[in-house]
Amino acid sequence: MIEFHEEQQLFHIKSRDFSYILQVIEHGILVNRYFGKSIKKFSDSNKITYLDRAFSGNPTSQNRTFSLDTLPLEFSSTGLGDFRTSSLEVLGQHGSALSLTYRSHRIYQGKEQLSGLPSSYDKEGQVESLEIDLYDSLADVTVTLYYHLFEKANYLVRSAKVTAGQYPVKVNKLMSFTVDLPRSYFKVHTLTGRYGHEKEWNVTDLPDGRFDISSIRGASSHSKTPFMALANPDTSETEGDIYSAQLVYSGNFRAFVEKTALKTSRFGMGINDDQFSWRLEADQSFQSPEVLLSYTDKGFRGLTNDSQAFVREHICRGPFVEKLRPILINNWEATYFDFTEAKLHALAEKASQVGIELFVLDDGWFGKRNSDTSSLGDWYENTEKLPSGLKGLAQKVNDLGMQFGLWVEPEMISEDSDLYRQHPDWAIQTKGRTHTYSREQLVLDYANPQVCDYIVNSISKVLESANISYIKWDMNRNMTNLPEAYANHENQEFFHRYILGLYDVLERLTQTFPDVLFESCSGGGGRYDLGMLHYMPQTWASDNTDAIGRLSIQEGTSLIYPSITMGSHVSASPNHQTGRHTSLQTRGNVAMLGNLGYELDLTTLSDKDLSDISQQVKLYKGIRETIQLGDYYRLAKTDNYYAYNYVSKDQSQFVFTFVKLLSVAESPSIQVKLSGLDSEKEYYCQELDARFYGDELMNIGLTMPHVQEDYFSVQYIFNII
Ligand code: DGJ
């Protein structure tokens, strides 16, 4: 519920678990009075302390205790006395400082989709919205703050818009949100890493000054996720305060928290202001992407449950949101570029024999692509490699009872391609400077609408040419050598224009082909973010397919993203990235924590391995709904083991997984307590041939087998009796 109390000029936004309170005070300044655990009614118990603080400027000479530098501002400009990190910077004939004062507000039911940007939605029409206009009369600039309350889901979705009045201006910075909190004793949680090692759950003490994470790669990146959480230092899995923010965006971003001199903190997130500026003519607007803001006092489990549900129900779209995902075989690690149609067919035959449902043909099927040095842009089949063409191959796969899927990388162009020979100017480049290469490829200029049209047409032709049920949309380098307009430093609009072009292409393709399941990928999880998930409800989490390497990647991912969005494959042993040997059982148990797939050469496996895989596939079909649509619980994470529990929505089934790392001499006995079960109900586990009541498993726990083996794992499936 959103209340406005006229007399106090106070907005009280009441979510399921938190209150968010704003007030218009003296001089029309909008301040944040409270953000935290829900309260019924606000009566000003936390009075603002007004003191004459040295070196903090005052808007009038009569009152030395009123300063923008010390107030909990809701959105703040530079240059008028607030010396903390600003929320925006707008240049114009007025200079760069904006005096933002309250002008008007609107409260209404529902919410609009952002134009050209991915955004949250609500099918049930329960969202309530508040818009507040702040205005600077000298600059004739309006800043509109948006607040969309998803009360049941416990999220406040925020964004901001700058509208020029009679003068042109340049927006050099616009955060999607900032909020001032009255304290700074937080630990900062982020998901960081690198290629093959994405989404490490990283925890840092908030230092004096500013802590921030950002990307300037043209993509959200492997190394940083557009997510930040501030937690009380003693927050545990089940208890403790956490403020979290996630940006619905796939390009350059910044997330920051500043510990101020007076031990308050300012938390914010938005498009990266480095290498960004946007020109507005008179009466034009610039809208920021949305940010999902939330608070829970239920620890990391509270954060995970809320976030996973919100992403599934209010960010991912389309017919696949609630649809169980097919078990796939992907030929990448099975063959790389070295395949023939006969080889693919043999792989597909084996896959169908073990019960796999979707065959995915990865890189190498188009143009003259026999290595990663050519043909990106030439989206037509190589009939030397595929004599029956895509249509014929898809038909053969369909005849085996499987769906057919295909890899594409439509944002890229190889110098050695017909497309480059025809349109060398379509590659992102600075004229007069040599290219910077990465995987020997260049990026197509999606800021150019002609390029976007061309790609929509050529990918549509591919999709129409054969019975294709799935697309893996890859993106294997980051951006450099930006075009001249950018390099001249007149308007640094390129990065954002590229992302708008990308979203336009994705919108058109996913709307035209709603029955195709799109999985996004950027060399694994290089763009695993909410922007991409809005168009493509699944992501290939990492090119690291090693079961043990995957544990931390999947755990970080699952902190905020639902398992149904996470592609996870069983690959060969020894693993191609790490050289590690692991059992098929452990590879299967780890891959079954997400959307199960296989990525190894089934034609060379022993009958025993094939029969084990066929068992895994059968078993996964029986638990798929619980894994993909159920509730996820982290049960234990130590230096040497991980344990998880997935519980079906009706609590009738749960899947318990335990993975140990290294075998240790004289290892203590390990007991793991389960979570999320019905304490009154009895469950049967076939693997243990035993029955237990939910309360016993949750209060006492299960003893893990004592096995002297590295990378040992178990998976127990319990069904209600
Ligand atoms: C990077 C992806 O992450 C891999 O899975 C594979 O599709 C290769 N690209 C193909 O070039």
Image (cartoon, helix red, strand yellow):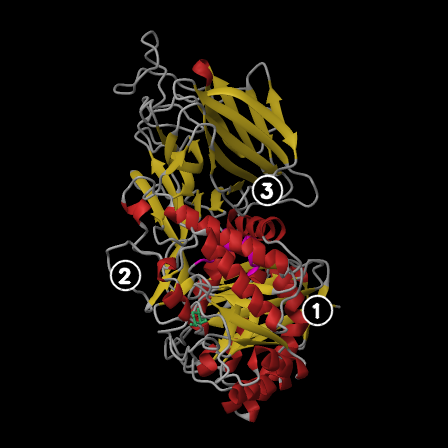
From this viewpoint, which residue is outermost toward the right?
A: 721
Could you say which is closer to the camera, residue 386 or residue 651? 386
Q: Is mark 1 within 8 Å of ligand 1?
A: no
Q: Residue at x 61, y 74 (%)?
A: 466
From this viewpoint, which residue is outermost toward the left?
A: 433
Q: Quadrant of the C terminus?
A: bottom right
Mark 3 or 2: in front is: 2
Q: Residue at x 45, y 79 (%)?
A: 333
Task: Check disc 2 and report the residue beneath it.
Answer: 435
Could you say which is closer to the camera, residue 524 or residue 209? 524
Secondary structure category for the residue under label 3: loop
Task: Check disc 3 and report the residue beneath it.
Answer: 113
CA–CA distance between discs 1 and 3? 41 Å
Q: Amino acid at mark 2?
A: His
Q: Amino acid at mark 3?
A: Gln
Mark 1 or 2: in front is: 2
Residue 525 spot, x, y in % from top left: 44, 62
Q: Is mark 3 within 8 Å of ligand 1?
A: no
Q: Is residue 532 magenta?
A: yes
Task: Check disc 1 and report the residue beneath it.
Answer: 719
* The quarter of the picture showing ligand 1: bottom left
Name above or below for residue 128 compared with residue 289.
Answer: above
Left or right of 187? Residue 239 is right
Left or right of 370? Residue 532 is right
The stretch of residues the image draws in magenta is 527-538
CA–CA distance between discs 3 and 2? 38 Å
Q: Please report whichever mark, 1 or 3, sits nearer to the chain's N-terminal start.
A: 3
Number of marks: 3
Q: Quadrant of residue 518?
A: bottom right
